[in-house]
Amino acid sequence: MYIDLSGKRALVTGASSGIGAAIAEVFAESGAHVAAHARTLANAEATVEKIKSAGGQAFAVQADLTDSAAIEAMCKTAIKGLGGIDIVMNNAGIYIPAAVVDNDGDIWQKTMAVNLIAPSLITKLTVPVMIEQGTGGRQLYISSVSAIMAEVSGSAYCASKAGLNSLVRCLAVEVGQYGITANSINPGWVDTPLARKAFEDLQEEGQSLEKLIEENMSDNILGVVIKPVDIAGMAAFLASESGRCITGQDINICAGLSLVRYGD
C-alpha cells in the first residue's frame, strides 16, 4: 500500500539521526513538506540535505527541548515555514540509566523535561493551529515498551514514557471532535546510533560489536533486529488518511518483546 502524504505539513523532532531521521525521510518520500528539528541546526540540516537530495521538501529548525522559550520559537518557525501544520511527530527523547536510589533530581528533571514536558508543550502550541485550520491533523509520539514494562535502572525513563502514553490518551479524547488523532508508538530495542553507543560501552575486548548488537537486539519473540524504518513505516501510516480511524492508541513495535519480561 502506498502512503500518500502529498501536501501535508509535518514537524518531526529529534530528526538528526535514528528513528527521527527515518521518519522525516519517509514522510518526505510520501510527499510531505517536513520541518526537521534537532538540538543543533547543523545536525538538522544533515537530514534536510538527505531529503532534498532524494527530491523531497524539508528545512531545518532547532531548539533545546529543556528550554520552553526555545521550543515556542521553534514551533513558530516550523509553522511559518510550512504555512500551517498537519502532522506533529514528537520523537526526541533521552535515556539516562540510574537505579531508583541513585536517581538524583537532575536526572529525573532532565528526563521529564525532554521526554514528557517538551512534547506536551509542542502539543499545546500546535493543536490550536490544527483546530483553526479546520482540516484535522495528526499528533504522534514515540514512546517505548518501557512505558509498560519494568526496567532495571530505568525508573525515570519508564515513568516519562508512561506519562507520555497517558497524555496521548487524554489528548485523543479532547481533540477527536476536530478530526485530530493522537497516537503513540512504543518501540522495543531499535538499531540506532544511540543504541549502538550503549553497546559500544558494554563491548569487551576482542568481542564483535555487530555480534553483540545482533544477539541482544534480536532477543525477542521474532528473533529480529528492529530498524528505524520499521518505526517510520507505522508513523507514516498513522499520519496518512489510512490511519484516520486510529486514535488514543499505544502501538507496540517490539517484535514481541512486550510479551516477555526482561531485566538484568
Image (spheres, helix red, strand yellow):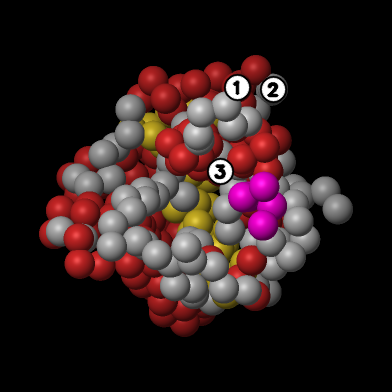
Q: Is residue 183 left or right of residue 260?
A: left
Q: Is residue 143 magenta?
A: no
Q: Which residue is mark 2?
A: 54
The type of residue carrying mark 1 is Lys
To which quarter of the image does residue 262 belong?
Answer: bottom right
Identify the main secondary structure in magenta: helix
Q: Is residue 115 left or right of residue 136?
A: left
Q: Which residue is mark 1?
A: 50
The residue located at (56%, 43%) in the rendering is 19
- Of callouts 1 and 3, the N-terminal one: 3
Q: Secondary structure at mark 3?
A: helix
Asked if marks 1 and 2 touch (Cβ < 8 Å), the reply is: yes
- Of callouts 2 and 3, the N-terminal one: 3
Q: Which residue is mark 3?
A: 19
Q: Secondary structure at mark 2?
A: loop
To which quarter of the image does residue 38 belong?
Answer: top left
The residue located at (69%, 23%) in the rendering is 55
Packing grade of label 3 (10 A; few <14, some 14-19, many >=20) is: many
Report the Cα–Cα distance between label 1 and label 2: 6 Å
Asked if marks 1 and 3 touch (Cβ < 8 Å), the reply is: no
Residue 137 location in percent, x, y? 54, 61
Q: Front-most of 224 and 114?
A: 224
* Front label number (1 vs 3): 3
User: Which residue reaches farthest front?
Assistant: 206
Report the Cα–Cα distance between label 1 and label 3: 15 Å
Q: Which stretch is magenta? A: 215-219
Q: Is residue 1 left or right of residue 153?
A: right
